[in-house]
Image (tube, rainbow, N blue to C red):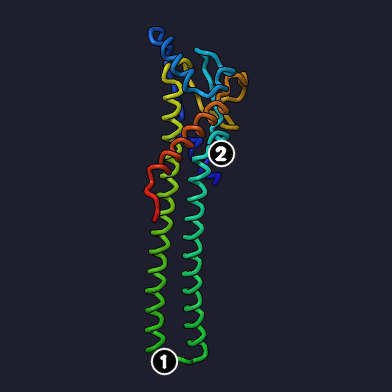
Amino acid sequence: MKKFLLAVSAAALLAAGCNKQNNAPAAENNAAENAPAASLATATSGDIAYFNIDSLVNRYDMYTDLRAAYEEKAKKAENELTSKGRSLENSVRDYQEKIQKGLVTRSQAQTMEENLNKQQQTFVEHRDKVMAEMAEEEQVMLNRIHYSITQYLKEFNSDYRFKMIVSSTGAGPVLSADPSLDLTEVLLEGLNKQYAAEKQATAKAAPTAK
């Protein structure tokens, strides 16, 4: 799923804004109540902070769950295509063997060839459809992860106690910075707590199977 991580990393995950002195005291109190306790030991109000998007996404429970579901579906799709492909290959070999051994008439051979062409066309169309559906599934996953992180960042920095929060990867753009400005662990803790609460609420709301 490296492609998945890279795609999320490429998204512009920024939460920026100037300090608003009029609302700062009340807003900072609300943020302190909702933010993870670890945030108290990190960057202070007014700083430009950052987080490592690769590390955040890779350890985000929502990503883990969505990735597992996607990989299971992708495996089933791959197995189905492999099975259909082998069936088509067997039909082609059977046709070739009968032609080589002279076991069918030219008319029969022509009919068999036409049927094989139709089977191949059907297979290619089905393969392309499945691949398009899986690509769409992956894009939806990207969108859900991106939306969840950006929405949490907006809430996390709703009081603008940080002038800006930028995302970084191992290759940049943040190449050197004070570790106290790294909000990765703080954001991860908050995101996972939020996701756990959402899962619990969804489970309670789901109808009980009889």
Residue found at the very far top of the displayed protein: 22
- Which residue is found at the position 47% from the left and 65% from the top? 80
Q: Position of residue 12 (x, y in %)?
A: 45, 30
- Give the position of the C terminus as an image quadrant: bottom left
Q: Is residue 31 above or below residue 146?
A: above
- Which residue is found at the position 39% from the left and 59% from the top? 129
The crowding category of the residue bearing disc 1, from other C-alpha atoms within 10 Å (few below 14, some 14 to 19, many at least 20), is few
Q: Is residue 161 above or below residue 11?
A: above
Q: Is residue 173 visible?
A: no
- Distance between the alpha carbons at the discs numbered 2 and 1: 61 Å
Identify residue for label 1.
Answer: 105
Q: Is residue 56 visible?
A: yes
Mark drawn on residue 118: none
Picture mark count: 2
Name the residue type under label 2.
Answer: Asn
Name the residue type under label 1.
Answer: Thr
Q: Could you say which is closer to the camera, residue 191 or residue 132?
A: 191
**In the picture, residue 209 is in which quadrant?**
bottom left
Closer to the observer: label 2 or label 1? 2
Q: Secondary structure at mark 2?
A: helix
- Which residue is found at the position 51% from the left and 13% from the top? 45
Asked whether disc 2 touches disc 1, contact meaning CB atoms under 8 Å apart, the reply is: no
Identify residue for label 2.
Answer: 58
The crowding category of the residue bearing disc 2, from other C-alpha atoms within 10 Å (few below 14, some 14 to 19, many at least 20), is some
Q: Position of residue 72 (x, y in %)?
A: 50, 55
